[in-house]
Image (spheres, helix red, strand yellow):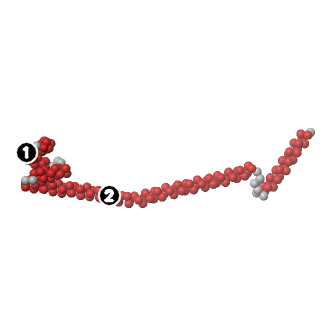
Amino acid sequence: MFNYLELDYKTKKERELRNAIRKLQSHRINTSFRSSFSNSLNKFIVKLKLHWGKTILFTTTVLFAIITAILLLNPIISRYEKYSNTQREEIILLRKRNNQRAFNFLINSGKKRLYHGNISGAYKEFKLAHAIYPDNKELNKLLVKTLNILCEKQVSYCEVLDVFKP
């Protein structure tokens, strides 16, 4: 019987507690841990969704900016490449012209020195011209001719002559 009263007491207490909770819920007040936890969880989920939304927005904005920059810079880069290629070709052409001028000057100067009897000076001119265009046949003939003359006067030039003779 004692157990029965105690059981009845608990149920009465439970009823009172339920009624109090219902009254508080009607006034929209959080009454239990479970509902406040679920509210907090819902708020966290909403914030997380907003955060992911902002992250996605930021990422798409950055990608859009990069793509726009690439599209805007593409014509500038292509013009620069064209200019760079043209300039490189002009520099190569200028170097070829300068080499040809220097070669012609050295050949003519060497011929004049050879004609006037300055054999060692002519050899030096031909040697410099040989550094510019080593495969020139006329130059090689002039070098051999000059080295033959120098070899008769000094034996040290005979070793160099052996290199140039075919």
Say above or below: 154 vs 53.
above
Q: Quadrant of the C terminus?
A: top left
Say above or below: 165 vs 82.
above
Q: Residue at x 38, y 60 (%)?
A: 76
Q: Nearer the viewer, residue 155 or 8?
A: 155
Q: Nearer the viewer, residue 77 or 104?
A: 104
Disc 2 is placed on an element classified as: helix
Q: Residue at x 52, y 55 (%)?
A: 59
Q: Residue at x 78, y 58 (%)?
A: 27
Across and down, in percent, residue 70 comes to 43, 57
Residue 149 can be seen in this image: yes
Relative to 87, 117 lies left or right: left
- Look at mark 1 in the image and give the residue it sits on: 152
Across and down, in percent, residue 121 comes to 12, 53
Q: Quadrant of the N terminus?
A: top right
Across and down, in percent, residue 95 comes to 23, 56
Q: Amino acid at mark 1?
A: Glu
> Within 10 angstroms of label 2, few (less than 14), some, or many (20 or more) residues?
few
> Within 10 angstroms of label 1, few (less than 14), some, or many (20 or more) residues?
few
Relative to 160, 24 lies left or right: right
> Of marks 1 and 2, which one's residue comes earlier in the chain?
2
Disc 1 is placed on an element classified as: helix
Across and down, in percent, residue 136 comes to 15, 49
Q: Which disc number belongs to residue 84?
A: 2
Relative to 105, 21 lies left or right: right
Q: Amino acid at mark 2?
A: Ser
Q: Nearer the viewer, residue 140 or 73?
A: 140
Compute the Cα span from label 1 to label 2.
Answer: 54 Å
Say above or below: 162 vs 90.
above
